[in-house]
Image (cartoon, grey):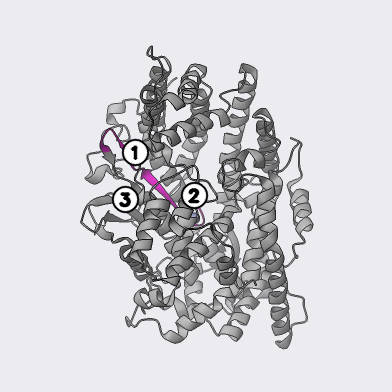
Amino acid sequence: MLITDCSNPSKNPLLEPWDTPFQTPPFDLIKNEHFKPAFIEAMDQAKSEIEDIAKNDEPATFKNTIEALETSGELLDRVGSVFGCLNGANTNDELQKISSEIEPLRTKHADDMYLNHTLFTRINDVYMAQASLDLNDEQKILLENTYLRFVRRGAKLNEMDQQKLRAINQELSDLYVKFDQNHLQQTTALGLVIEDKDGLVGLPTDVIEAAAELANARGQAGKWAFSLQRPSFTPFLVHSERRDLREILYKAYINRCDNNDEYDNKAIISRIAALRVDRAHLLGYENHADYTLERNMAKVPENVYQFLGELWEPALRRAKIELADMQRLAELEGATFKIQGWDWWYYASKVKHEKYDLDEAALRPYFQMESARAGAFDVAEKLYGIQFVKRNDIQVYHPDVEVFEVLEADGQHLGIFYTDYFPRDGKGSGAWSSSFREQSNIDGKFVTPLVYNVGNFAKPTKNDPSLMSLGHVTTLFHELGHGLNSLFENTTYAGSRRVPRDFVELPSQIMENWATDPAVLKTYARHYQTGEPIPDALIEKIVTSQQFNQGFRQVEYLAASFLDMDWHMLTEAVDQDASTFERDSMEKIGLIPEIAPRYQSTNFGHIFGGPGYSAGYYSYIWAAVLDADAFQAFKETDLFNKELAHSFRRNVLSRGSNDMMAQYVKFRGREPKVEALIARLGLE
Ligand SMILES: [Zn+2]
């Protein structure tokens, strides 16, 4: 392979030992051009490590095969995780180009490993002999995970089918990259540019300021611009009195990547769905959902449909009541139209004001980002005794990123935690948590985790600090929950911690309960100017309004979950018209036209931007049943019950298991009940 530039690996910081505090990535030295050669070098290195394992003359043992495989590819993990972070949170044309070039190579690299016959024979030997091996519980889990990962990636297929599988994986990997790039382009695109002040009627000052800054940044100084990122889109739909403009922005939003232009994702989706069917068939499954769910708590699609169905009826019933409430209010104000999708946020906000008198804007001064973050840290400190200490000596990839060292109660170093909370061009939408390095402890070498949280919360303006919405505050707590999960991991092997997709949101979602608990709000929600704690009256309103609009929220979420499942129940690899498919799918469940699924197929990044949440978007509410039930245990005793927290950390957060239900039962003393969630959402 010809490498044109930066081919001297000794000059590449991604390939050097990191002589930084806690071996954190040396972002000051890492440049875009380092990634491609580093990937190539790291893949070569991983490949030769794998070859050494496969060609070992000794008989296969747990140590020389399973554990050796677990420790291979360390450099590739390192390069991949830094690149993944930057390409998600701070991307540019150059990184995207590298991504397009590297992803197919990484897919090939992975397939070369999973389809390496000599290697699999050794894994299989160890797996078959396990009854006679003296393995501890964690080693047994690692062995099973490794074996199944290979089988599920095609290790048992014959040569010809393996070739087919490789081709499918290669094509999928290209399609994911294309889907994501189109998605990012259309989400950061401007959905509305306002040229005269008439278009601003109803908008609060901070929204107008942010719109002016966005227009300025996009070369349209003197105008006001709104992108299709939620922090820009949502406030406009909530506040704008210009129904015509709301309609324009709303339609731009739900039509992302569905405009029959170069960024259209319809054909890409159809092809992804078909390839997933082909792959499922090759591996002996009827459809992609069967293949995916096998290793989840839900096990089979029927369980998911039944579960979603139980929530769908009460949610839809509630949404129709909400719609009627809004229609009545609109008519009282003299409206002669029927409420449409682009009216929902606007009138919902009015109903909220009328019923609960809760003005979201009045809350923001109490939710300065720094206070909300300190509040979230404080919850973790009270529950688990840990501490977050600000560090200014650790390099970051953007000035908005801040770094904390996380310590145990006794001062022992636990890991490093980065926060990157403000939206900017080149950052994907939404919020997420990930790691530059995962915890492990092989041969007495304890590796501590480097964890980061990314969000798109209110950016400070010229005049104000970051004043967050309540929704973004709960998201901040949510992502910290994922972060704690990574920070608390305490196993020998990272590979023994596989947790099912439908479990993984429990650690994050449970934190949201503390975010909005009155006693906790009192501690961190302080006015950014006066320092006064949030008044009881506002807390009361937050609590009572929590069930507000839950019909809408659950319906849009559940609709997207059904859509995801339907795409992955296909049993024939034939072209689908994505629009028709989506319409049919939504008709089947009786979705009302005033509500769109939370994502349309063409911008459903969770399921089409990668393997991610395909046949797994339902996981959020599945995990919600668990988090509501788990939080109930704290509420029944003490919000900061240290003993319970300790058990939650030990049984649920610190280790993976192939039976997470059993782990949960160890914590709760019984299986979860759905009642706590139904009550919380007010859907009885
Ligand atoms: Zn999450």
Q: Nearer the viewer, mark 3 or mark 2?
A: 2
- Tell me which segment is drawn in magenta: 425-445
Q: Is mark 3 within 8 Å of ligand 1?
A: no
Q: Amino acid at mark 2?
A: Ala
Vertical relation: 57 (above or below) 354: above
Whichever of callouts 3 and 1 sits on the residue coming sooner in the sequence is 3
- How many numbered tags mark residues here? 3
Q: Position of residue 187 (x, y in %)?
A: 57, 55
Report the disc number at residue 662: 2
Decide if residue 519 is in sight here: yes
Q: Nearer the viewer, mark 3 or mark 1?
A: 1
Indicate whether residue 584 is drawn in magenta. no
Q: Which residue is mark 1?
A: 492
Q: Position of residue 401 (x, y in %)?
A: 34, 56
- Residue shown at the point (58%, 76%) measured from the top left: 239
Q: State left or right for residue 281 relative to residue 620.
A: right
Local crowd at mark 3 within 10 Å, few (<14), some, or many (≥20)?
some
Report the disc number at residue 396: 3
Q: State left or right for residue 208 relative to residue 307.
A: left
Q: Position of residue 257 (x, y in %)?
A: 65, 50
- Residue shown at the point (58%, 23%) measured from the top left: 156
Residue 483 found in image quarter: bottom left
